[in-house]
Image (tube, rainbow, N blue to C red):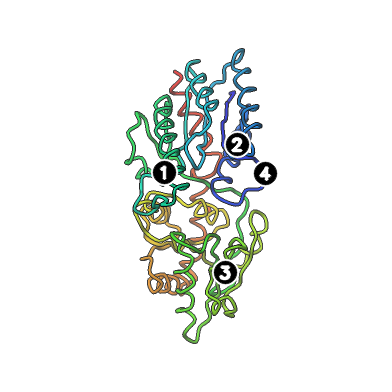
């Protein structure tokens, strides 16, 4: 099958979910044996000329060719450039089924992501509002609009909306890890919950028992960690991603998702959840709706409230029973193989859109 795959990132080193997911889907389409015409490149002004050239090449190709399906991975912001809008309309006019993955919709939650108040910021927000309305109108052409979770789709009114959460990879399973050692890969500030996680481990280490935390974050975020904790004997800080995480996961016996709960995080699915499963990690998550449901449905860990004390109690309880930890590890591997690999996501998209074609 021939797939036109439109993304809004520059392929290469990926350090966040917005960059990882499109590349994993691309590789999965190829692994499924499909031929893929890839349109990549960001919407940054510095890359506008290159993006326009790539769009024009694909548009010219469409004059004499017709892909079986078109799959689009959304940008963080609305689709900004008019040439992209014209291209997607051209694909629709040729009768090609279109699937669109809607990753970011923070603008639906202004109470958590307030608008800017300075003049320049207000002008930028007004521009994004206009482009968001145009993008939403454009998406009426999509045969299927995918979201990270079923709950996320409740904020929209497209004719066919389906959940397409992230996925994991096979072949990365590690051993049981070191005793009382946890790992967290992610941000420190805000909804990520890194500050609450650090406070939870400070509480855990007030007693006689030692609970170690391996923290992998961006180097620029180290300053967000209270100075008194940076040198704590139980904290180990790393700045790495991709294969650099392999030896860190091998040492951990429990993986952390400390996301702070609000209306937006309730409907989001952290890509790290499935990465944790890829390494056979039991997951200690806060009770954010979409992720907590995945933890419970797949039987891969426990959830708790998002306060430091509740996170600490959950970690202590989970690490107290080696047999339960081993059961969660086995279930993590099974959950991936039973339908949560990237190849499963790619297969689902292809089957969904081919059905639309008939």
Task: For label 2, count other residues whose C-alpha is less than 10 Å away and answer few (under 14), some (14-19) or many (20+).
Answer: many
Foreground label between 2 and 4: 4
Find disc 4 in the rendering and name its residue.
12
Tell which of 190 and 287 is nearer to you: 190
Q: Residue at x 54, y 64 (%)?
A: 184
Label 1 sits on a secondary structure element that is loop
Residue with the most extreme front position: 119
Dot placed on the residue nearer the N-terminal end, 1 or 3: 1
Residue 36 visible in the displayed image: no
x and y, in percent, of residue 264 in the image: 38, 51
Label 2 sits on a secondary structure element that is helix
Separation of residues labelled 3 and 4 (CA atoms): 27 Å
Q: Residue at x 61, y 69 (%)?
A: 237
Vertical position of residue 85 compared to residue 167: above or below: above
Task: For label 1, count other residues whose C-alpha is less than 10 Å away and answer few (under 14), some (14-19) or many (20+).
Answer: some
Find disc 1 in the rendering and name its residue.
105
Find disc 2 in the rendering and name its residue.
26
Find disc 3 in the rendering and name its residue.
223
Foreground label between 3 and 4: 3
Q: Residue at x 67, y 58 (%)?
A: 244
Dot placed on the residue nearer the N-terminal end, 3 or 4: 4
x and y, in percent, of residue 152 in the image: 37, 44
Task: For label 4, count other residues whose C-alpha is less than 10 Å away and answer few (under 14), some (14-19) or many (20+).
Answer: few
Separation of residues labelled 3 and 2 (CA atoms): 35 Å
Q: Would residue 304 appear left or right of 55 to someone viewing this image? A: left
């Amino acid at each position: 099958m021939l797939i036109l795959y439109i993304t809004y990132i520059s392929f290469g080193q990926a350090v966040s979910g917005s960059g990882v997911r499109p590349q994993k889907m691309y590789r999965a389409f190829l692994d499924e044996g499909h031929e893929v015409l890839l349109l990549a490149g960001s919407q940054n002004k510095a890359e506008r000329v290159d993006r326009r050239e790539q769009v024009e090449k694909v548009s010219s190709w469409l004059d004499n060719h017709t892909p079986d399906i078109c799959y689009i991975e959304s940008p963080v912001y609305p689709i900004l450039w008019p040439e992209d809008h014209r291209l997607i309309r051209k694909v629709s006019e040729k009768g090609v089924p279109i699937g669109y993955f809607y990753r970011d919709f923070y603008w639906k939650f202004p109470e958590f992501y307030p608008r800017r108040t300075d003049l320049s910021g207000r002008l930028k927000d007004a521009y994004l509002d206009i482009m968001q309305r145009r993008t939403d109108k454009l998406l009426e052409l999509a045969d299927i609009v995918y979201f990270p979770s079923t709950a996320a789709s409740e904020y929209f009114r497209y004719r066919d909306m389906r959940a397409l959460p992230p996925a994991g990879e096979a072949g990365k399973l590690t051993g049981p890890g070191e005793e009382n050692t946890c790992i967290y890969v992610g941000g420190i500030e805000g909804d990520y919950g890194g500050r609450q996680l650090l406070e939870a481990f400070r509480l855990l280490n007030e007693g006689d028992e030692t609970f170690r935390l391996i923290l992998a974050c961006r180097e620029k975020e180290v300053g967000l960690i209270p100075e008194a904790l940076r040198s704590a004997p139980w904290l180990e800080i790393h700045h790495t991603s991709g294969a650099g995480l392999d030896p860190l996961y091998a040492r951990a016996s429990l993986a952390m998702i400390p996301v702070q709960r609000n209306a937006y995080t309730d409907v989001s699915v952290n890509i790290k959840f499935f990465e944790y499963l890829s390494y056979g990690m039991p997951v200690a998550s806060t009770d954010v709706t979409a992720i907590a449901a995945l933890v419970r449905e797949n039987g891969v860990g426990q959830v708790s409230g998002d306060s430091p004390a509740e996170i600490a109690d959950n970690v202590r309880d989970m690490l107290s029973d080696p047999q339960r930890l081993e059961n969660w590890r086995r279930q993590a591997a099974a959950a991936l193989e039973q339908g949560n690999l990237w190849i499963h996501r790619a297969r689902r998209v292809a089957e969904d859109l081919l059905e639309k074609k008939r």
